[in-house]
Image: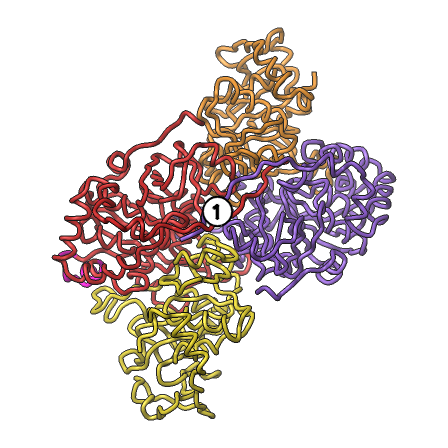
Chain colours: A yellow, B red, C purple, D orange
């Protein structure tokens, strides 16, 4: 379901910076359905990848074979990302807060962490430079606190200052795709608000899974379920071994 | 140049060029990570190393577990596609003796550190880090003011490893090295480094290199040692030679969670073998399972 | 991506993407200099251009003589291996109407300007220019202080051409472009530019590009137009296709010394032909004389 | 003669930044005689070139075919030259002055030049970064003034300040090869002095061709003439069309 919803965020012809896991599945689903001209770019240096098998990592050899270009990582970050060529970046995180700031670094204090997470990887710069980002994360009060323990990837506000004033070129996390609802950034305040509910989910349920008083958008829509074709593609073609689809 | 051979065994290369206390880089983004070199460094008991790499991966997890490392310089420390690096986590969360010292960037920051080192500039500018907590965690992330626009830009300092180990598909005996598929920051890391060890799947004649010079990523003039070590990147992969051993990456989650099991792994597959050939002998069937299929490109004309 | 064709004629590409007053870059270091595009710009009577390039070469000499240029941004203005560019010299020494405005760097400075433009940074740092008079001649060469060592480093500002024209051996219809042999600053110039025109010796199917992705220098996503124009780089050369026409470079010394002869050259070989095919028809025997010999590289395996 | 003398400046195994013209001839002569392991690097991006024909320009296709590496010019200047990997750089110039400063930019004032020369190309940075440089230029009072009209490539002193104090990594122009004599930089003052005379040339002749009171070194040697083999190689193998050998 999350993969289908994330795939809908992508328009044909866009250039997408693909992360591993669900975003990877979502991008490949979009590519074989409504967005055949999607350009998939992986931070490993593969541009225009057409993987024959579902890549297990963003450095999978299947991303190289048959791709349009392979370049060094200095080019990926300088000539493509910093150059402003990425339309959409996908991000995930252990924590996402009220303003879309994401933490993938530590739970607890940095110097003496309770849980040490992997760190930024390319997430910090994707959050800053992609024209927009889409965040994918499962809802829970622990994952959606009012404020993250550590800002790895900046959202819409930092210490009360808006991202544009901080000099960030991209628009930031415009949508957060969860397993129960879609949140969207309020255009003025930059705060995440409820935009649409999955079938059978109530607003109260979503609000209970979020660590701040979640506002509702003007028109809280209802998310269409995946089509039969989407499900078949995901289960039989894209991820038959259920590497990413668990349930 | 044909008579300048730098060919030596992995044992000799590590003995000569990797010293206690060095800053060591074994680079390769998923692709061409030289596990064979990491294992030899463990076997020779190097300590007090500063290990630098974008993605520490399983090899640095093993080196941390083996007690080689004092400090880690990195940007993403996980088991890609699987989960955590547990030896790393124990060392950082303070559950396993003295805390591992960390110096943490993002990928772009690490790439920029290697770029500065390779260009022998003291810093590299990048538009990054506004709104993040990374500069708070790492005082080496600073700013510079543009002399044209007046705007502040982030900077990172040059990284100059004492030794960089690059795994590659092929090189000649003088160290002229060709890589295809993902090239990561291998070139920048090699040029930034005081010493360079190249480890290859295939040793080729100089004429093979000269037949396609645009494929050369690292020139022999900056290389100190060439080691022929087929399968030296396993469980990482070498495009055109063998696939990534994803099963081992998954198994590492279980092995690395338990310090005892990790120790047994090192005893058997690192300390228990003298070199990579013996390591491969302990894994019958592996080579057959991971052998690459043929997807050969055609050549281009270099004539005039 | 297969259905996005950017293929068009040189006439259409120049009409759509090159405007009066633009900053225009036709790059290529000796290799792959797109004379065909320069000639079309002359034919369409563009004026007031800022021409930027490391080595103005014969093509900018012709464009200066034809009255296209207001300003030149460069690092070495000569006829390589022969002598002077005489139209350029007349325009700079003030012997031929209004003086051409100059903005002058060294090669490293120009390379760094393209690198900054390509990375969308406002400046690029380099260790250079101490003891030279270049910063006195060009106030855009400035300094920045390293935030780590305190030392001053030279800087140059980013160059952002309005349009960059890249000649290449081959591309697909979407503009995914492969170049081998000398690559100069073609990649950086293309990424720095607002619009990109790729001119190729051969238009190939996307599958040819995909069979060897490490050879791709410029991805289609930054390309606006693809022009198929065989021999479009003559008298410059295309490795694997045709040799440099050194005789013409030598002849240019004579032609360009005399404004009348230069005018007659432009009348006959630029204004007097509609396109490159007609230009080549006026030179029987040229193709045979310069045709490249075969020196084919073998392919590599991209399988896994 | 100048080509032979310049070739002798090169030791086997060194990395040389080759310019066009006589330096090119000299480097190729050294490579086929006493320095088979010389690595020839051209600013065009060809590394380890073994040209089948004498290259007419530094971007000649013969430098690419069969070379060890071809890289972009950003790599040439950043990773190789600025990185400090060049042992010897060759420079030529319209004017060379008392302290080895070289002018290839303008004769006369910069804004209204009497003669406009090509400019720096890579010369400024070669002069700054190569571990040492060798200058090749024919002697004449116009070519060797006390002070050049424009410093394109810095020598040993600029405005009285020594190059090391200005932060230049390389040792600068240690030798100047002319058609009558070899000049060398005085280790202390950085001033060019007479080091050796070609057979049949007197010190007075050389002094008359230089625009400052030329000092003589302690031991003014005599330059050995080219060997028969050198001459044969130059005339029959390396430059049979006399592209660079004129006389």
What residue sits right under mark 1 in the picture?
C153
Name the quadrant of the N terminus of chain A.
bottom left
> Residue, x 52% and y 11% (percent of image)?
D220
In the image, the segment drawn in magenta is: B88-98
Q: Is residue A199 above or below residue C118?
A: below
Asked if D222 appears above or below C79 in the picture, the reply is above
The picture quadrant where one finds residue B56 is bottom left
For image coordinates 34% across by 32% down, the residue present is: B7
Q: What percent of the width, then of the height, locates residue C240?
A: 62, 40
Q: Position of residue C130 (x, y in %)?
A: 52, 40
Q: Residue at horizontal 55%, vertical 9%?
A: D224
Name the residue nearer the viewer: C161 or D232: D232
Q: Residue D134, percent across and down?
A: 54, 25
Q: How many marks?
A: 1
Does residue D8 appear in this view? Answer: yes
Answer left or right for A58 relative to B41.
Answer: right
The percent coordinates of residue C71 (x first, y second) are 72, 50
The foreground one among A26 and B277 is B277
The answer to whether residue D162 shows anywhere in this view is: no
Q: Is residue B118 magenta?
A: no
Is residue B97 shown left or right of residue D15? left
Q: Secondary structure at mark 1?
A: strand
Relative to residue B70, is residue D61 depicted above or below? above
Q: Check the residue under mark 1 and report the chain it is in.
A: C
The residue closer to the viewer here, A110 or D190, is A110
Q: Residues within 10 Å of mark 1 (few under 14, many from 20)?
A: many
The quadrant of the picture occupied by the C terminus of chain A is bottom left
Q: Quadrant of residue C281?
A: top right
């Amino acid at each position: 379901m999350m993969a289908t919803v994330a795939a809908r965020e992508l328009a044909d012809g866009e250039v997408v910076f693909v992360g591993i896991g669900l975003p990877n599945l979502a991008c490949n689903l979009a590519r074989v359905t409504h967005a055949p001209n999607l350009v998939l770019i992986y931070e490993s240096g593969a541009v225009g990848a057409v993987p024959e098998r579902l890549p297990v990592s963003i450095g999978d050899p299947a991303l190289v074979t048959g791709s349009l270009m392979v370049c060094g990582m200095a080019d990926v970050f300088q000539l493509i990302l910093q150059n402003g060529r990425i339309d959409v970046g996908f991000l995930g995180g252990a924590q996402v807060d009220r303003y879309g700031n994401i933490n993938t670094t530590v739970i607890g204090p940095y110097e003496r962490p309770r849980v040490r997470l992997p760190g930024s990887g390319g997430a910090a710069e994707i959050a800053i430079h992609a024209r927009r980002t889409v965040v994918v994360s499962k809802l829970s009060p622990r994952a959606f606190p009012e404020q993250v323990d550590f800002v790895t990837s900046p959202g819409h506000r930092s210490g009360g200052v808006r991202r544009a004033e901080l000099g960030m070129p991209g628009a930031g996390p415009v949508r957060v795709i969860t397993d129960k609802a879609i949140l969207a950034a309020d255009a003025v305040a930059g705060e995440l608000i409820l935009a649409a509910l999955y079938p059978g989910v109530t607003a109260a349920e979503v609000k209970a899974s979020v660590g701040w008083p979640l506002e509702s958008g003007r028109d809280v829509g209802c998310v269409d379920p995946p089509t039969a074709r989407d499900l078949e593609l995901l289960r039989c073609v894209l991820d038959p071994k259920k590497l990413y689809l668990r349930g | 140049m044909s008579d300048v051979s730098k060919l030596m065994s992995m044992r000799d290369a590590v003995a000569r060029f990797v010293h206690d206390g060095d800053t060591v880089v074994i680079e390769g983004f998923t692709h061409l990570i030289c596990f064979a070199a990491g294992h030899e460094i463990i076997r020779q008991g190097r300590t007090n190393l500063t290990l630098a790499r974008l993605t520490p991966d399983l090899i640095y997890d093993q080196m941390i577990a083996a007690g080689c490392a004092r400090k880690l310089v990195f940007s993403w420390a996980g088991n890609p596609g699987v989960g955590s690096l547990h030896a790393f986590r124990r060392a950082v969360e303070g559950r396993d003796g003295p805390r591992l010292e960390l110096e943490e960037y993002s990928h772009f920051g690490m790439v920029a550190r290697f770029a500065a080192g390779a260009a022998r500039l003291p810093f590299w500018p990048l538009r990054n880090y506004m709104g993040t907590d990374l500069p708070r965690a790492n005082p080496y992330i600073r700013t510079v003011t543009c002399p044209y626009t007046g705007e502040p830009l982030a900077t990172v300092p040059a990284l100059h490893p004492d030794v960089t180990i690059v795994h590659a598909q092929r090189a000649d005996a003088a160290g002229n090295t060709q890589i295809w598929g993902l090239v990561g920051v291998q070139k920048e890391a090699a040029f930034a480094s005081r010493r360079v060890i190249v480890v290859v799947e295939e040793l080729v004649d100089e004429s093979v290199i000269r037949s396609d010079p645009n494929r050369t990523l690292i020139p022999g003039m900056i290389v100190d040692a060439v080691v022929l070590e087929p399968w030296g990147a396993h469980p990482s992969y070498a495009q055109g030679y063998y696939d990534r051993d994803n099963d081992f990456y998954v198994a590492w989650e279980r092995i690395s969670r338990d310090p005892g099991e990790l120790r047994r792994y090192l005893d058997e597959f690192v300390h228990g073998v003298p070199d990579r050939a013996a390591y491969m002998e302990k894994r019958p069937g592996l080579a057959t399972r991971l052998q690459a299929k043929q997807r050969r490109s055609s050549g281009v004309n270099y004539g005039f």
